Structures are given as structure tokens and as C-alpha cells.
Amino acid sequence: MADAGAGLRAVDITDPAAPRDLGAADTPGEALGIDLDRAARRAYLADGPGGLRIYDLSESASAGPPRLLGQLPLAGFAWSLRVNPAAGLVYLADRLVGLRIIDVRDPALPRERAVFTAAGGVFEVALAGSRAYLATGQGGLRVLDISDPDRPRDIGGAAGPGAAQGLALLGNRLFVTAGTDGLRRLDLRDPDRPRPDATWALEGLTERIAVEEAAAGALRRVFVACEWGGLAIVTPRDQTEDPLVLPWLSAAGR
């Protein structure tokens, strides 16, 4: 897991009731976002001012902290990322610059293929086929055609309310955390023209988000991290009704 100033931490969760810390790999920046290539047993880390770092997980269970395979320093602030293992590409959200597309087919020598500049930077990216959805803060949601990774093309977006900060995609629905404006759901049946579908008011400043999938690709729960508000859990009553907001889990500080 990305453990901010403590770096990349490996945790054995074979027994979920008794997780075991395997150690941490210190990083030069601040470990803020992570994605995994499970088949290759690699972790890709957005390390704030430390750029992109790539780790080998193949020996973590027995040898402790992950081993660094490669890195790419960046003149920006790496906030989060998504990896497309089949294409050998990482899509990195840079809070100061925009979206960076990085070739990681050789993990020892990652190289930047393209940069899409966004005013205010990019907080989060979600991938769906040849489309990338960008959370650009006050700039709202942007949609890119990434069929040519060397030439990403802006093809539209969706404005607020609120600032687009976190993204989670499930099927043809995109969940967007909107800062002080809670949680939004967008309909992506037309992938180039996201359409507002539902909104939930949540306490605090909504930021990071994750979805839990049930059987047959149905939504089970949505987890939303709310700064100074704790953890919100949104869950559907069934596959046809809108989710409900369940009681908060308390969290000290942020």
C-alpha cells in the first residue's frame, strides 16, 4: 500500500483478521497512489515529487519490502495512476501538470510517451477501452481519446457541481467525488458524453474513492474517503434502486 511519507508498504493479508507487516520500501517523495500488475507481480507507485517508481513484488512474501525495478523522475507531482498491463502503459495523474502517459514495457527504463496538459492538474484517472476519464479539480471531468498513446485527444467532459477529485469506474457508471459537493454518478452509455445520473450529499471534503463489485459486475458498495468526515459507505438496496448512505466510520484527524 501507498503509505505517504513511510513509502511503499507490503502487508500480508492471508488472514484478514491478523494482517502482517512485511516492511516498507522508503521512497524519495511521498507515496500517494498505487496500482498493481498482478500477473507480472509489479507495483506502480505515484510518489509525489519523487515521480513514478516501479517495484517487484515476486519475493515480497518471503523477503520483506518490495524491490525497486525502475523509476522515472518527473518535474511535477505524481498523485495517482492507473496501469494498462496489456499495453505496457501507465497513466499518471500529475497534480501540477496533467496526464502523463508512460511506457513501462521495460520496467527498468520507463519513458514518457505523451503529456496532456490540464489547467489545475489532474487528481485521478479512470480507463475504459480507448477512453481516459480525468478528474481535474475545479475543471471538472475531461474525456480523452487514448487510442494513440502518443497523441491523447480531448473530446469533451462534464462540468460540476463541485470539483472532480476522485474517480471509480464500474461498468457504464462512473462515480466522481466532488469535494464539498459529495458524490456524483455519471452514466457512460455514451462514453464520449458523460451524463449526470445521481448525486449524494456527504459530510466533509470527498476525495479518494473505491468500488466493490458483486456478482456479475453489479455494484455492491462504494467507499468514499472524506477529509475531516471519516469514511462513507454507499450501498444499493438492490440492482435497480439508488444506493443508501450508511453510518460513518469514525476516523481520527484526516
Image (cartoon, grey):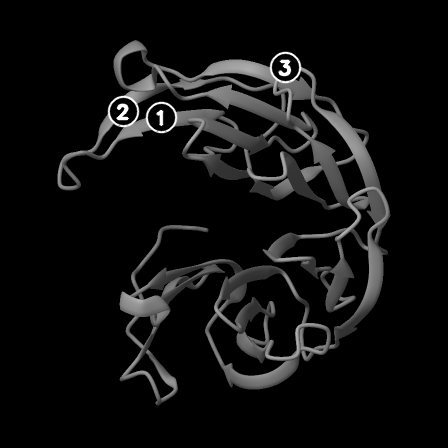
107 or 243, nearer to the observer: 107
Q: Say which residue label 2 marks.
A: 21
As displayed, is residue 46 above or below residue 29?
below
The residue mark sitting in front, 2 or 3, is 3
Q: Quadrant of residue 96?
A: top right
- The amino acid type of the residue labelled 1 equals Ala
Amino acid identity at mark 2: Asp
Vertical placement of residue 212 versus 123, above or below: below
Looking at the rendered structure, the kind of residue marked 3 is Ala
Rendered location of residue 231, percent (x, y):
37, 61
Say if 230 sits above or below 242 in the image.
above
Q: Secondary structure at mark 2?
A: strand
Q: Are marks 3 and 1 in contact (CB under 8 Å)?
A: no
Q: CA distance from mark 2 to mark 1?
A: 6 Å
Q: Locate residue 238 relative to residue 37 in the image: left or right.
A: left
Q: Around disc 1, counting alpha carbons within 10 Å, would you say few (fewer than 14), some (14 to 19), or many (20 or more)?
A: many
Which residue corresponds to the image point at 69% horizontal and 57% vertical from the top-left? 130
**Residue drawn at point x = 73 percent, y = 52 percent:** 122
At 74% across and 77% down in the image, what residue appears?
Answer: 159
Report which quarter residue 90 is drawn in: top right
The first of marks 3 and 1 along the sequence is: 1
- Residue 6, placed above or below residue 137: above
Identify the residue position indicated by label 3 in the image.
Answer: 108
In the rendered image, residue 146, in percent from the top left (x then y), is placed at: 75, 53
Which residue, given by chain and number where applicable, does mark 1 sit on? 10
Cβ atoms at labels 2 and 1 below 8 Å apart: yes
The local crowd at label 3, few if under 14, some if 14 to 19, many if 20 or more residues have their Cα within 10 Å, is some
Q: Secondary structure at mark 3?
A: loop
